[in-house]
Image: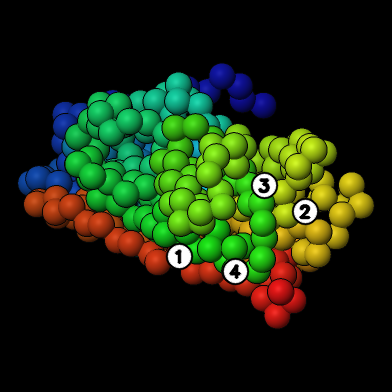
Amino acid sequence: MESGRAVTTIRDVARVAGVAVSTVSRVINQSGYVAKDTEAKVKVAMEQLNFQPSGIARGLISRKTGSIGLLVPDVANPFFSDIARGAEDAAIAEGFSLFLCNSDWQLDRERMYLDILRRRWVDGVIVAGTRSSESDLLECIGSLPFVVVDRKATQMGSSVWSNNEVGALLATEHLMSTGCQKIVHIAGPEQSPSATARKTGFLRAMSQRPSQSALQSLLFPGDFRYEGGYHAALSLLNSSAPPDGIFAANDLMAIGVIQAAESLGLHIPQDLAVVGYDNIAMSSYVSPRLTTIDQPGYKMGQAGFEILFQIMHSKTQNLTDQEFEPTLIVRESTRSILLH
């Protein structure tokens, strides 16, 4: 049994073929002029050595690897999983592979992965749900083509996004329309642009309701995770003045709210109306089914790659801003207006 066998390199191929390393690179990349007989020598040497050029080897001259990076903050969150699936399916259709990186909502990990992707010579990057400032993001990405998903870019590049403020306004107004008297918003992580926009939309809707004066008291911190919604709801519902309506900043937290309410013997929506955000598949499986704001993660991921593909193949990197309109999906977790 052989062990410790050396890996065949591009230099080995050049030595056997009797040519320069740059000549082997031109053959691998099909870039630049190589005489027919010289090209044949290189290919014979590659066959003799059983040399299989890697993506990095093929990119030595062209700087193209046929791969892109996708950075998400939480791969366990079904909304970001949908974005990843949409981006990956679109990438595969164009012959690209995709490297998935999970930052776990940590800025230092986000920067680490962006640096790794840049050094691995990926052809472009999709950044979803980033918490980085625009200046930090631009510094980390450098000259690499990129698209931001789930965030509207102002000066930093192309983006695919949904109007989170409008979506939150729809969610809050729906709770008002069903007769809820005390509505609380369980917010998303700090520094998350989508969470900030949803909080702004909630406050905007509540400011139109004269009976609600102390708006800040109607906000509760959250983290976009099921456990965060569950524990926030336990705290709120065990208080001396519990809410009768909760708008959670995403579906995972909203499902946590439903589970917490039921553990306390409350009935949804009779005792508590609940609205989420994202319309993940799970929102239609939970009982009662969750009223939510739809934003199409899969289509947003597809659009992110399609825009990145255009940027990577264009000498003039025109900025593109694609917006998806949020939609209210009414299900059984909110009361029928006919009851009031």
The CA span between labels 1 and 4 is: 18 Å
Amino acid type, callout 2: Ile
Look at the picture and state if 313 lies above or below 15.
below
Q: Is residue 190 left or right of residue 268?
A: left
Q: Report the residue at 59% width, 63% height from top.
A: 176
Q: CA distance from mark 3 to mark 2?
A: 9 Å
Task: Check disc 3 and report the residue beneath it.
Answer: 253
Q: Which mark is residue 177?
A: 4
Mark 1 secondary-structure assignment: loop
1 or 4: tag closer to the N-terminus:
4
User: Mark 2 packing: few (<14 Cα in 10 Å), some, or many (20+)?
Assistant: many
Q: Where's residue 116, x and y in %?
A: 39, 27
Residue type at mark 4? Ser
Instruction: Specify the quadrant that holds the N terminus.
Output: top right
Asked where in the image residue 229 lies, by quadrant, the reply is: top right
In front here: 96 or 69? 69
